[in-house]
Amino acid sequence: MVLSMDRWVGQVAIVTGASSGIGKAIAASLVEQGLIVVGIARRSELVEEHSKQLSGKKGKLHAVKADVTKEEDILKAFEWTSKKLGPVHILINNAGTHKRTTLTEGNTEDWKATLDLNVLGLCIATREAVKIMKANNINGHIIHINSVAGHTVPNVRHLNVYPAAKFAVTALTETLRQELTHLGSKIKVTSVSPGFVESELTTLSKTQTPEDKAKLAQMPILKGEDIADGVIYALSTPEHVQIALSTVTNTVRPTHAMVLSMDRWVGKIAIVTGASSGIGKAIAASLVEHGLIVVGTARRSELVEEHSKQLSEKKGKLHGIKADFTKEEDILKTFAWTTKNLGPVHILVNNAGRSGSERLGFVRIATREAVKAMKAKKINGHIIHINSVLGHTVFNVPNLNVYPASKFAVTALTETLRQELNHLGSKIKITSVSPGLVESELTTQNRTQSPEIKAILEKMPILKSEDIADGVVYALSTPEHVQIHELTIRPL
Ligand SMILES: NC(=O)c1ccc[n+]([C@@H]2O[C@H](COP(=O)([O-])OP(=O)(O)OC[C@H]3O[C@@H](n4cnc5c(N)ncnc54)[C@H](OP(=O)(O)O)[C@@H]3O)[C@@H](O)[C@H]2O)c1
């Protein structure tokens, strides 16, 4: 793991909406990591109270009273921060609201309040933060607390302009990212999109009808701390890694301590396809370091065996299996060998594949076999699809042919499987990890590349395979009630 919060220790972070819920949890996490945090809210007395509770921690929490729907309040909060504490390094745009009304009968004031806070307040705070970061040459980080409703409108009554506001946040994240890229800036932008979280906006709301309350009580729910974990992961990535989107959805009600940990996987079996090079090799190494028994499949299994020797001192173990995953019989044999010789599979990382259509076939088959094995042994396992940013947007790059189509299919397969597992009441998790350009045999180390493509690739920022392995380990480390649905990792 190359994840570290060290570069942020002693630096200044602003968290909007820090008086309750997600913002309060994020402020606490940042203070624990040693940051100087400015918690903005209208009820600043709640932030002050929280600051006292955090007094023994490594960092410090300061309360600033501000209404984020008022531009002058935002400007004053930033001025106060710069003057008293120094320039801001991190901005967490978390303050948000939802009014219980409708689009067909709702009143304009409610809609305006939502859009002013969730969209315009976020834009103004972002502009101020970027100005300060640029003026002080700070490679800072801006994190928008978005929502799953910022990607798909959920079928829930009384949402009115809330999803529209969050869709705007999705667009604002990407627009800002592109603007900063054009400027050659190294400021990062991340959108974190939670599912349903316990807070004053949901289960703790005082304005809920008994009918709504009863419905909410049935739903699986996240804690603010789970979102704070996602924020810390995004902040911990090295300077060349940008988490563009991390959607956190929930599976079951929390029963466990809210901490990231790989402990429950120690000694368990993981199958990593395409483990002979690149991303698959890095993931296999990371899992072995965390104490897993890893079956690394590849046509060039001798490379996996060679790698296994290099990892012989580590906590876990790597087994190389020769398999061509375009052949169903090879996939079936791999699962049969694994079950017989090592035990049932707990984790499947679908990573292998060159051409799109090939990959699609074995992703389906390998996933089916893994789910079968997990269901038979009642294992709450985890299936990870190594997808691509091209699974979400087609880029203007030559010779892509069916590759983006196959990745769009992986995006759909991930969601379809997630829904299928939900319907079955299964606790098996499914995560899509979508990297941008990564140094590997598929890209920069590809010997068959045309000089034209080579020249394009050489100019582009690029990720290391280990950055993807870090993302996989983060997704696996979440507690059982947390499901990372989509994790997009881009180079900066
Ligand atoms: N809870 C969920 O299920 C869920 C799911 C997805 C996304 N989210 C998003 O997560 C973010 C935080 O929500 P939450 O669930 O933690 O809700 P929450 O407990 O109600 O917290 C909202 C925070 O925003 C602050 N706030 C509201 N209006 C403000 C204003 N005009 N000026 C300054 N601060 C204001 C509140 O502080 P004061 O009232 O003291 O000002 C409070 O600290 C929101 O952006 C929300 O859309 C929540």
Image: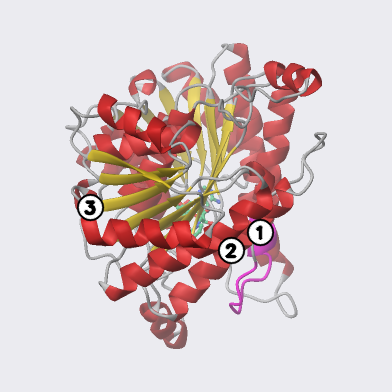
Is 217 drawn above or below residue 308 in the view shown?
below
User: Which image quarter holds the C terminus?
Assistant: top right
Task: From the top left corner, tell me how far across and down residue 240 is, in percent.
Answer: 53, 22
Labels 2 and 1 touching (C-beta < 8 A): yes
Q: Which residue is mark 3?
A: 268
Task: From the top left corner, tell me how far across and down residue 442 is, in percent.
Answer: 61, 32
Q: Amino acid at mark 3?
A: Lys
Residue nearest the observer in this picture, 377 or 79:
377
Residue 389 in the magenta stretch? The answer is: no
Is 83 drawn above or below residue 189 in the view shown?
above
**Mark 1 burial class by Cα count in 10 Å: few <14, some 14-19, many 20+:** some
The prevailing secondary structure element of the residues shown in magenta is: loop
Residue nearest the observer in this picture, 412 or 181:
412
- Residue sitting farthest toward the bottom: 211
Question: Considering only order in the chain, which callout, 3 or 2, is on the residue closer to the N terminus?
Answer: 3
Residue at left offset 65%, top offset 63%: 163
Residue at left offset 65%, top offset 19%: 185
**Circle 2 sits in a helix, a strand or a loop, which is it?**
helix
Which picture quadrant has residue 286?
A: top left
Residue 156 in the magenta stretch? The answer is: yes
Task: From the top left corner, tell me how far across and down residue 488 is, in percent.
Answer: 56, 43
Give the Cα distance between marks 2 and 3.
25 Å
Question: Considering only order in the chain, which callout, 1 or 3, is on the residue closer to the N terminus?
Answer: 3
User: Which image quarter holds the N terminus?
Assistant: top left
Q: Which residue is mark 1?
A: 409
Residue nearest the observer in this picture, 172 or 355:
355
Q: Which residue is mark 2?
A: 413
What's the image's color scheme? secondary structure
**Mark 2 burial class by Cα count in 10 Å: few <14, some 14-19, many 20+:** some
**Circle 3 sits in a helix, a strand or a loop, which is it?**
loop
Q: Which residues are magenta?
A: 153-166
Q: Is residue 252 visible to the viewer in this orientation of the structure?
A: no
